[in-house]
Amino acid sequence: HNDRGDESSVDQSNTNNGRKGIKRKTNWREKFNRGDVLIITPQESFRGKDPYPKEGLVTDVGTNYISVGVGASYPLGLFEMRKHSGRYMVRVDRSAPNAPLKAQRLALDKLRLGKSVVGSAAVTLVESYHKGVLAGDDKKRTARKAVNATCFSDVPQHFDGHADDLQEHIMSAIKKAGESTTFEPNESQRKAVLFALSRSVGLIRGPPGTGKTRVASLLISTALKMKVNRKSTPHSTEDDDTEQQPEHPRVLAVTHSNGAADVLLQALLDMGVPAVRHGRPASVSPSVQHRTIVALSDRMPEVIRLRQIANDPSGDLQDRQSAGYDIKQYTNDVQTMIMRTAPVVVTSCISAQQMLSDDSAAFPIVVLDEAAQTTEPALMCALTAARA
């Protein structure tokens, strides 16, 4: 529903503070962003029926209008009111969407099934939390040191074939990663990458402006230059053909928000990393939409050929319908193939849970940027999906 009228751009709050009659224009972009979930509640009853709230999603925002998708049906009375003059008054409240809550509950349910289902990274974090946080106040410092020494310092399973010379292997990979970018890491940044890749869990901290996102990109690029122990990749067994296992680790790069995911993706592309973006194209910045899995599948030659057939008004109707069906099937297959083979997939923590149903889309390494913005249950969505 688009409301572009003058009344929609009036801030009514000014009529309640002694300045009645003084109205100022509202810049809707200052109040809402694309992707916000809103609760829309009609302010008047309709034909004796009490109004009920309806959930909507902001699809576009301008300075004096807002577009909201409300699903398959209109809010109560709106369809009928379009025939009459006047305004359809509603109360709009920003709300937390239900989908992320369901995703986090699903991830926590998976977590209860143990390492064989969700991988060791998620379980290790949970165990460290209980050991380090639930201990008494006077024992917390000692507990944290013990956890740090036992849980996090182990050589990652996917690199255990290089246990004796792991640091040299990582430094060599850092040097190779630097050859494809103009980014020159300083000594502290190189040590941070070395630290993170040589442990099962690593935390890199730094004040704003110290290049943490670029370090995350360098870390991912470095990981792609390293070889993994094929027998230790997620869900591999003794009976698996090691020739079919990836030679280099796949990386799931996640953030708390879509905006941060786009920034990380751009940093990876600048570093020459062939990363792809998972998620709805509408929630992705236009500057990196060409790297979404949807956009990549749309550019496949077969999809383009089928779409030309389907859109040809002079073509046979049956051929056009058949091509339309084939486009959907082929596009789904291509998107699945990209998801399973891309060396780096970038997404938000919540969106990562959509990969839970694909047992083959496993990632031995998960990199979380802007970690301080993320809650533990949201992170579990990424870890359980990756089975890291």
Image (tube, rainbow, N blue to C red):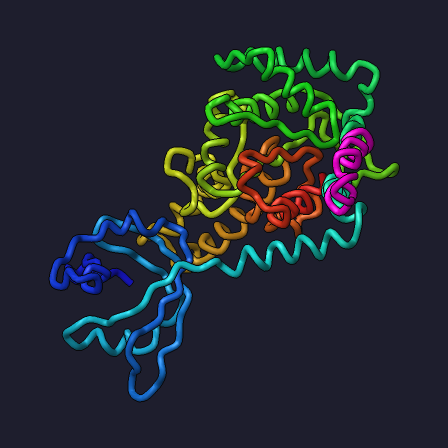
Which residues, given as a range, are shown in magenta? 131-150
Give percent across and percent down for residue 294.
48, 43
- Residue lying at the far front in this picture: please name it: 138
Give percent across and percent down for residue 269.
48, 25
The residue under the point 64% across, 23% down is: 224
Based on the picture, tell me whether residue 141 belongs to the magenta stretch. Answer: yes
Q: Is residue 211 above or below residue 72?
A: above
What type of secondary structure mainly makes up the magenta span? helix
- Residue lying at the far right in this picture: please name it: 238
Q: How many labels does the image show?
A: 0
The residue under the point 59% across, 44% down is: 336
The residue lying toward the viewer, choosing from 304 and 144, is: 144
Based on the picture, tell me whether residue 339 belongs to the magenta stretch. Answer: no
Quarter of image, res 51: bottom left
Give percent across and percent down for residue 148.
76, 31
The C terminus: image quadrant: top right
- Residue lying at the far left in this picture: please name it: 21
The N terminus: image quadrant: bottom left
The residue lying toward the viewer, choosing from 306 and 370, is: 370
Note whether residue 199 is visible.
Answer: yes
The residue under the point 64% across, 20% down is: 193
Give percent across and percent down for residue 368.
59, 35
Q: Is residue 75 left or right of residue 344?
A: left
Q: Is residue 182 above or below residue 102?
A: above
Note whether residue 334 is visible.
Answer: no
The residue under the point 70% across, 43% down is: 360
